[in-house]
Image (cartoon, rainbow, N blue to C red):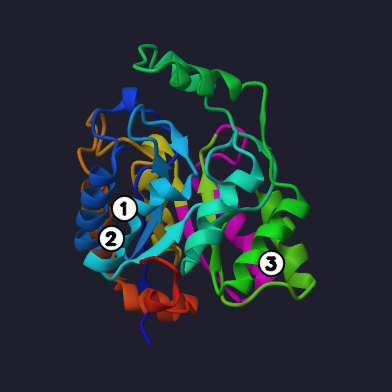
């Protein structure tokens, strides 16, 4: 069967702040609108975070997710992927709450502790609507994004008990070796869905040489037991997606990863980026997977077997 390419869309995330783009979805209604339009444009998977509707700060309160998840679940067929990354400065216990409550088909799982440098953004964005925005960026200079082996194992074990599969987010080559430990111990469920996250300060750079190195390493460690996807942060988003797709990857776009739709143009909707990456894929004579095809490719439990209602 000809391979279909899964488009994931990370709708809002915890990296960018509302002051950086007026188009960043913050309220539940905005997240719903962006999500449904992204799915209609071709996103088979919606990777979802939540924000406080008053000031836009990232939150893992299940009550905030409840404001938009049931509507998205009802109104479209997308695979819902809930973050366990949350924000780099949240506790692991806080980050797990929505996934444990809603038992989604997919959840993200970060595969190692790391420096997660957001502070350089302050050179480009120095006018903020809310004090938390400046504080969050400044704290990233002296805090760690904590994902110990114990943290990873706890999230993985509890998620698997709920039938949730994982998008294993690997920000560097060492994260692939961390994942391989669990593979070697027989703790993973194939097929693995590995996301190469490239271009975050503190992780691997977003260029073709690094992408090839990540792919060769994953091939060596996992053979044919895995599916892979790529994320390019910021201005590298489409270039890394195009390179990855040409090498056989799935792709991820969305305002979590980049605020842009072409040089100097802020994306007004997540769907703008989905449409652009779809054009790239179709230009490469690649077929875009539907949500049901994505479920089959990734071995998911099905839309009706979650706790989203």
Alpha carbon distance from label 2 to label 3: 27 Å
Marks 2 and 1 in Cβ contact (< 8 Å)? yes
Provide residue 190's location: percent of width, then percent of height.
60, 77
Alpha carbon distance from label 2 to label 1: 6 Å
Which one is in front, 155 or 257?
155
Q: Which residue is disc 3 drawn over?
A: 157
Residue located 24% across and 43% down the image: 30
Q: As displayed, is residue 188 above or below residue 269?
A: below
Q: Could you tell me which secondary element the residue under label 1 belongs to? A: loop
Q: As displayed, is residue 96 above or below residue 182?
A: above
Q: Which residues are magenta?
A: 201-230
Q: As displayed, is residue 33 above or below residue 24?
A: below
Marks 3 and 1 in Cβ contact (< 8 Å)? no
Q: As displayed, is residue 9 above or below residue 262?
A: below
Label 3 or label 1, whichever lies nearer to me, is 1
**Picture quadrant of residue 25:** top left
Provide residue 192's location: percent of width, then percent of height.
58, 70
Q: Which residue is disc 1 drawn over?
A: 68
> Is residue 82 within the magenta segment?
no
Residue located 44% across and 71% down the image: 306
Badge 2: few (under 14), some or many (20 or more) residues near its Cα, within 10 Å?
many
Residue located 62% across and 21% down the image: 141
> Is residue 207 within the magenta segment?
yes
Badge 3: few (under 14), some or many (20 or more) residues near its Cα, within 10 Å?
few
Specify the quadrant that holds the C terminus. Answer: bottom left
Quick one: label 2 or label 3, which is nearer the N terminus?
A: 2
Quick one: label 3 or label 1, which is nearer the N terminus?
A: 1
Marks 2 and 3 in Cβ contact (< 8 Å)? no
Q: Which residue is disc 2 drawn over?
A: 72
């Amino acid at each position: 069967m000809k391979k279909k390419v899964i488009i994931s869309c990370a709708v809002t995330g915890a990296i960018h702040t509302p002051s950086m783009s007026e188009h960043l979805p913050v309220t539940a209604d905005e997240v719903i609108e962006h999500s449904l339009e992204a799915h209609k444009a071709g996103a088979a998977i919606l990777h979802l975070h939540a924000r406080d509707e008053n000031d836009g700060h990232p939150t893992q309160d299940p009550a905030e997710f409840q404001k938009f998840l049931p509507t998205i679940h009802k109104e479209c067929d997308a695979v819902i992927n809930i973050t366990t990354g949350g924000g780099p400065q949240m506790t692991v216990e806080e980050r797990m709450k929505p996934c444990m409550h809603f038992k989604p088909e997919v959840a993200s799982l970060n595969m190692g502790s790391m420096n997660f440098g957001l502070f350089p953004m302050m050179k480009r964005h120095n006018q903020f609507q809310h004090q938390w925005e400046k504080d969050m960026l400044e704290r990233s200079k002296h805090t760690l994004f904590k994902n110990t082996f114990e943290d990873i194992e706890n999230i993985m074990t509890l998620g698997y008990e709920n039938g949730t599969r994982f998008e294993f987010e690997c920000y560097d080559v060492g994260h692939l070796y961390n994942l391989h430990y669990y593979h070697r111990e027989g703790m993973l469920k194939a097929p693995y869905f590995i996301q190469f996250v490239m271009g975050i300060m503190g992780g691997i750079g977003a260029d073709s040489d690094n992408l090839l190195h990540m792919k060769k390493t994953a091939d060596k460690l996992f053979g044919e037991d895995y599916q892979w996807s790529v994320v390019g942060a910021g201005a590298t988003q489409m270039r890394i997606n195009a390179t990855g797709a040409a090498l056989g990857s799935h792709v991820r776009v969305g305002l979590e990863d980049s605020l842009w739709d072409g040089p100097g143009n802020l994306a007004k909707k997540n769907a703008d980026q989905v449409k652009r990456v779809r054009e790239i894929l179709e230009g490469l004579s690649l077929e875009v997977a539907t949500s049901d095809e994505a479920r089959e490719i990734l071995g998911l439990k099905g839309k009706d077997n979650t706790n989203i209602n």
